Image (cartoon, rainbow, N blue to C red):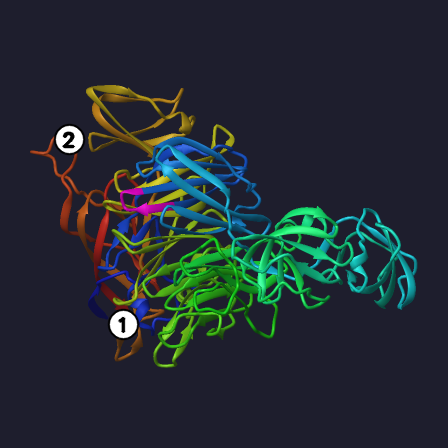
């Protein structure tokens, strides 16, 4: 019979996966737990009861999704933004609603496909189906959400897209085919251009009228009618400028035969080495334009020596779905028809994407790989990091060199792929969720291999991400914790400090389901907000709540009364629920909320009322190697347990209550003193093959467990 004293000094490995319960041979087993629920490991080693949540406001629509996005100008001017179905609402950092609501182009079904980046007081918002918008704070009471007023968008010679059908006399390869458009589409200068629809291609050989043209089918069409089609290339005729200077001047551009359309206004013309923006349509042969870059001359430019180009961001090709700010440029990517193209603005001019070859000109380039995977996110960690569905890329200008139009180096160091959850940067690592939504990876530069690596941070706690991750938020202070919202409504958390080798997973639950999370800085640290779906009085509701150490309940309300009161209201959002009540620091009996209020048996001057949640820590069966081998599988008895606490009130071990309060000088209707020290409990039972402890705090009171000392007897 072996009698040992075992000391678990910390819980920094967090909750380990059930798949790891047999791995008593690894170091993290000794520092882990089988269950850590509604608590989180801290970097110093202990486990702390998680913060409760304060009720801020109901979401605007209880039956539709909403999402929280932080808007941070500085630590004293930080706001939480609620994006919902075609609306935006602004909240102050103290949890109060500002009363400001803006009209939004984003429906509730689009919220999980939104990305954003903020610079100073301007936030750019990205979605592949909506033009890039800007959210701006003018004053605390004046905000705006509108399309970003780009000076120049990226453009290309992409032709014209028609969203109405056309009919071809014969879809097979051959000459003399007749194409009939459902709307006026053809001009004389279209002779020589190509019609594309699906896999079919036809070259225009003659224009009979605005709706009829003769073509030569080069690639067969799938049918005689097609719902949409495109006219590729530029007008096939000469283009003559009235002048070639000065920059900013307005000149006319005259075609040899009709080729201009009223829809050409806003497009760009590259001619004689210059660039002009079409501003006024006069006739099919004459338009006016502003000189953006001066041409070398005004001589007539023949067909194919000049081009008519339009923005690649449009309703047909889509819009960038991801972006970031990097090296004083706005970097964008991930549009549906240009899935692997990245555009970067001019240096210091976020709204100007005019391409060029100078170092500060805008840039456009493609990520090269053996698969076409759309860019889902763009981050940065000493390099620009485009993340795609199929792999991770790094883009730089070389060692200590900036990216320029003539100096771009893109690499593909790993092929894990990511999902739609926005990545989070922690220190010098970029944390992203792998494609299937289950693995959390940390991308960082590895000096030993001179490349970027992305190790799996959830490998020892893979169960913590069960059902998949749908949102993330990072709290840097007071504890370094990454919050990960799961699809099933559980909140997984990971306490992380790479310098101290701390990666501690835990699970947070509530009476309902977490749906979104975001963090903003305050004077006392970062504050995490969440959208919670609850069932109140048989109805589904959605609440905006924020985690805070000021409460030990969920969806809580803190209130005070100068004269004291027994009836406490303001609880309509918890109608019909049993709630925990802390009155002047003393836990009262649970009450049922009726008509938005509860009644307590005595007067109180300050109360904290909300939903109960239970903190639970279950230790692992210890492993001890001796002369006879492993302790696993033997009969074990924990004869005595010593728990070391810090500022704690209340605890149960394997169902037995530990007394934190003695009768005598402390009066029962006054709050107990926070306890720091050790408590011992004796005479726990024998068990075969295991010796675990379940430590529970089910009261809305502080709890901080530092370490667990077990006196254990092991029999063969």
Q: Along the horizontal axis of the image, is 562 left or right of 410? A: left
Based on the picture, tell me whether residue 74 belongs to the magenta stretch.
Answer: yes
Residue sitting at x 75%, y 57%: 230
Residue 466 showing in the rendered view: no
Residue where numbered disc 1 is placed: 624
Residue 204 location, x and y as percent? 83, 62
Based on the picture, tell me whether residue 254 belongs to the magenta stretch.
Answer: no
Residue sitting at x 61%, y 62%: 338
- Assign the C terminus to one quadrant of the image: bottom left
Residue 14 location, x and y as percent? 33, 60
Bounds of the magenta segment: 71-77
Residue sitting at x 11%, y 35%: 663
**Looking at the rendering, which quadrant does residue 194 occupy?**
bottom right
Q: Along the horizontal axis of the image, is 435 left or right of 169? A: left
C-alpha gap between disc 2 and disc 1:
45 Å
SS state under label 1 = loop
Q: Along the horizontal axis of the image, is 323 left or right of 228? A: left
Q: Residues within 10 Å of mark 1 (few under 14, many from 20)?
A: some
Residue sitting at x 35%, y 24%: 570
- Assign the N terminus to one quadrant of the image: bottom left
Closer to the observer: label 2 or label 1? 2
Helix, strand or loop: magenta stretch:
strand
Residue where numbered disc 2 is placed: 670
Residue 405 location, x and y as percent? 48, 70
Please say if 451 is above or below 252. Answer: below
Residue 137 location, x and y as percent? 39, 40
Dot placed on the residue nearer the N-terminal end, 2 or 1: 1
């Amino acid at each position: 019979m072996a009698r040992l004293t075992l000391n678990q000094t910390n819980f920094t490995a967090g909750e380990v996966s059930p798949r790891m319960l047999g791995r008593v041979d690894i170091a993290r087993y000794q520092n882990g737990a089988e269950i850590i629920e509604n608590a989180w490991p801290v970097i110093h080693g202990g486990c702390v009861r998680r913060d409760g949540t304060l009720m801020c406001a109901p979401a605007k629509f209880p039956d539709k999704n909403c999402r929280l996005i932080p808007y941070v100008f500085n630590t004293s001017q930080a706001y939480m933004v609620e994006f919902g179905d075609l609306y935006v609402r602004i909240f102050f950092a103290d949890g109060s609603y500002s009363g400001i609501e803006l009209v939004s182009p984003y429906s509730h079904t689009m919220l999980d496909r939104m990305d954003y980046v903020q610079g100073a007081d301007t936030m750019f918002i990205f979605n592949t189906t909506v033009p890039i918008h800007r959210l701006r704070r003018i004053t605390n009471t004046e905000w705006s959400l509108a399309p970003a007023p780009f000076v120049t968008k990226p453009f290309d010679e992409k032709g014209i897209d028609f969203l109405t059908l056309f009919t071809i006399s014969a879809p097979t390869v051959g000459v003399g085919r007749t194409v009939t458009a459902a709307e006026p589409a053809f001009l004389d200068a279209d002779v020589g251009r190509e019609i594309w629809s699906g896999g079919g291609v036809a070259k225009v050989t003659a224009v009979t009228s605005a709706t009829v043209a003769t073509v030569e089918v080069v690639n067969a069409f799938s049918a005689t009618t097609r719902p949409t089609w495109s006219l590729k290339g530029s007008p096939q005729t000469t283009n003559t400028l009235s002048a070639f200077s000065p920059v900013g001047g307005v000149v006319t551009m005259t075609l040899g035969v009709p080729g201009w359309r009223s829809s050409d206004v806003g497009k760009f013309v590259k001619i004689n080495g210059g660039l002009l923006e079409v501003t006024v349509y006069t006739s099919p042969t004459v338009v006016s334009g502003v000189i953006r870059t001066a041409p070398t001359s005004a001589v007539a430019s023949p067909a194919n020596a000049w081009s008519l180009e339009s923005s690649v961001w449009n309703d047909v090709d889509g819009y960038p779905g991801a972006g970031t700010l990097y090296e004083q440029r706005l970097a964008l990517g991930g549009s549906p028809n240009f899935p692997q193209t990245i555009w970067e603005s001019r240096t210091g001019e976020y709204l100007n994407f005019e391409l060029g070859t100078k170092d500060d000109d805008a840039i456009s380039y493609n990520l090269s790989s053996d698969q076409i995977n759309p860019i889902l996110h763009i981050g940065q960690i000493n390099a620009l990091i485009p993340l795609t569905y199929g792999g991770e890329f790094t883009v730089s200008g070389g060692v200590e060199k900036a990216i320029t139009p003539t100096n771009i180096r893109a690499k593909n160091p790993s092929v894990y792929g990511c999902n739609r959850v926005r990545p989070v940067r922690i220190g010098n690592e970029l944390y992203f969720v792998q494609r299937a939504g289950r693995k959390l990876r940390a991308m960082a530069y590895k000096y030993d291999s001179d490349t970027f690596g992305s190790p799996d941070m959830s490998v020892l706690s893979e169960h913590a991400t069960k059902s998949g991750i749908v949102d993330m938020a990072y709290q840097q202070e007071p504890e370094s914790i990454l919050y990960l919202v799961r699809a099933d409504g559980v909140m997984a958390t990971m306490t992380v400090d790479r310098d101290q080798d701390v990666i501690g997973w835990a699970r947070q639950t509530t009476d309902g389901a977490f749906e979104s999370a975001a963090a903003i800085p305050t004077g006392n640290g970062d504050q995490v907000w969440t959208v919670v779906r609850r069932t109140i009085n048989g109805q589904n509701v959605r609440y905006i709540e924020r985690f805070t150490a000021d409460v030990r309940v969920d969806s809580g309300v803190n209130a005070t009364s100068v004269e004291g009161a027994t009836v406490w209201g303001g609880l309509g959002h918890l109608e019909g629920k049993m709630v925990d009540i802390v009155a002047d620091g003393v836990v009262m009996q649970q009450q049922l909320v009726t008509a938005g209020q509860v009644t307590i048996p005595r007067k109180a001057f300050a109360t904290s009322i909300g939903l109960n949640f239970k903190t639970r820590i279950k230790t692992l069966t210890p492993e001890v190697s001796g002369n006879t081998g492993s302790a696993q599988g033997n009969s074990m008895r924990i004869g005595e347990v010593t728990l070391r606490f810090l500022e704690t009130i209340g605890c149960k071990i394997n169902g037995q209550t530990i007394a934190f309060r003695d009768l005598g000088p402390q009066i029962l209707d006054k709050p107990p003193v926070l306890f720091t020290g050790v408590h011992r409990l004796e005479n726990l039972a024998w068990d075969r093959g295991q010796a675990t402890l379940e430590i529970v705090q089910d009261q809305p009171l502080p709890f901080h467990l530092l370490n667990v000392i077990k006196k254990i007897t092991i029999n063969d």
